[in-house]
Image: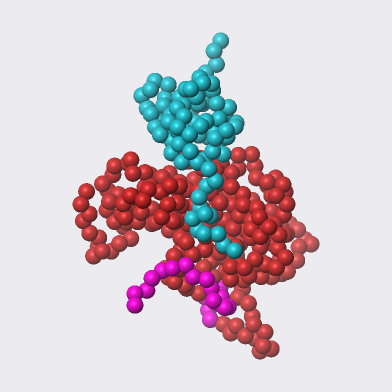
Chain colours: A red, B cyan
Amino acid sequence: MPRTLRPTQPRGHVHLEPSNGRRRERVEANGRVREPAFLRQDGWSLLHTATMEVDPLTGHFGKPGLWRLVGQPVQGVFELPPLLDLEGDDELDRDELLAECRAWALCTAHGNVPDGWQPPPRAEVEAWIPPGGLTIRSGTQARQARLVHEPERLALVCPLLTGLAAELSPARRSWLRAVLLDGQERWRLVRLGLTPTAAAAEIDLTGVPPLIVESVFRTSLGALRWVVAWLVESAAFLADRANPCAALEVCPVRDTPAERRVVPC
Amino acid sequence: MLKPLGALMEPPDTFDFEASDVTGTHTVTAQGVQRLLRTSDVAASLAATMALPKSVPWALRDESTSAFLDDEKPIGEQLRPGAKVTLTPKTHLG
C-alpha cells in the first residue's frame, strides 16, 4: 500500500527527541521520566519531536503552541525566542520559567491547551501592537493580519493568498508549495499553511506562560511581518494566472532530473 | 475543537474593484482586497503595481462621487465592490 501524507494527531505520548542529538535514558533511576531539555541555539530554545508522516503545510496549522513542521523527514520543532527584555531581571527564577515553557511545549505537542490557561485581556494585547502593526506591505502587495483572541486561543494570522484559482496549473501549485516550504524551513516561529484555495501564515501563542507573553508576542509580530513581507509578492506572482510565464510550467528544481518532464505549453 | 483548515485560512472579508492612473494608461483589477486594509496602504500597493514613482504620495478618488478617499480609514468602509477609482498624486496647490 503506498504511503500517503495526511494530517495526523499525535497518539499517546509524543516522543520528543533529546535536543542534544544523543540518545539518553528517559527514565531515571528513581522511576521519574526525565523530560527532554531545550537545545540552545543562537539564543533560541528548541525542542524537536520524532519524525512523522504529515504534510508540513497543513499538519500543524491552527493548532496550539509554537510547534511547526520542518525538515525531511518531517519533524515538529518548538522554538522559544530569546527573552531579551527579561535578561536584567534578577528576581526571575529562570529554572522555573524554563520548566513552565517546557510544560507549555509538551502540552501543546499533543494539541492541547494547558489547563486553566487564558490569554491576557484583549485590550492589553492590542496595546502591544504598534499603530499599523497588523498591516504588512511589500511592493505590490498589502495584507492585513488579524489578532485571534479567544478564550482558549491567542494567535496572529495573516492571509497570503485567497481565492486560489482551481484552474491554477499543477506546476504553478508545485512552485507555490516549494516557495512556502522554503519559507517554513528558512524562518523561525512562523507557520505556513496551504489549502487548494488559500495560503496563510500564523503564529500560535496559545498556552504561553503569563510571565513571557508580552515578550513572545512582540517577537512573534515582528517575525510574522518579516516572513509575510518576504513571501507575499512571490506567492501572489505564482498564483496570478494573468501572468503568462511558460517558465513557471517547468517543474520546481527540487525534482531530480529523472522526474522532470516536458510539459507542453 | 479545531476549526477546519479552510475556515482558519480565509480572511474575514475581501472585495474587488478597478483602479486606473490619472492618465488612464494603466488599469488594474484589484482582486481579493481585504476590507480592513488602510486606504493609504492600498493606494501605495496599486501605485507599485502600475510602476508609478514611489517617492510620490498617492490618493484614491472614487469615480462615482469624485470624492477622495480618506487615507486613514479602511478601504472597505469607503468603496463598494466593483467600484472604479483613480490613483492620483497628492498635490498642494497655491
Q: Is residue A21 magenta?
A: yes
Q: How many marks?
A: 0
Above or below, comparing residue B44 to residue B8 in the picture:
above
- One can see residue A71 in this view: no
The N terminus of chain A: image quadrant: bottom left
Q: Is residue B45 magenta?
A: no
- One can see residue A163 in this view: yes
Above or below, comparing residue A249 to residue B68 in the picture:
below
* Residue A8 rendering spot, x and y as whole percentages: 49, 70
* Residue B3 rendering spot, x and y as whole percentages: 55, 59
Q: Residue at x 52, y 71 (%)?
A: A9
Above or below, comparing residue A83 to residue A1 in the picture:
above
Q: Residue furthest right?
A: A91
Q: Residue at x 64, y 82 (%)?
A: A33
* Residue B92 rendering spot, x and y as whole percentages: 55, 16
Q: In the depicted view, which residue is nearer to us: A199 or A131?
A: A199
Q: Residue at x 46, y 52 (%)?
A: A199
* Residue A251 rendering spot, x and y as whole percentages: 29, 56
Above or below, comparing residue B38 to residue A187 in the picture:
above
- Characterize the magenta stretch by its predominant secondary structure: loop
Q: Is residue A74 left or right of residue A19?
A: left
Q: Residue at x 38, y 70 (%)?
A: A4
Q: In the depicted view, which residue is nearer to us: A260 or B84?
A: B84
The segment highlighted magenta reads A1-23
Q: In the depicted view, which residue is nearer to us: B10 or A76?
A: B10
Q: Is residue A244 left or right of residue B82?
A: left
Q: Residue furthest top?
A: B94
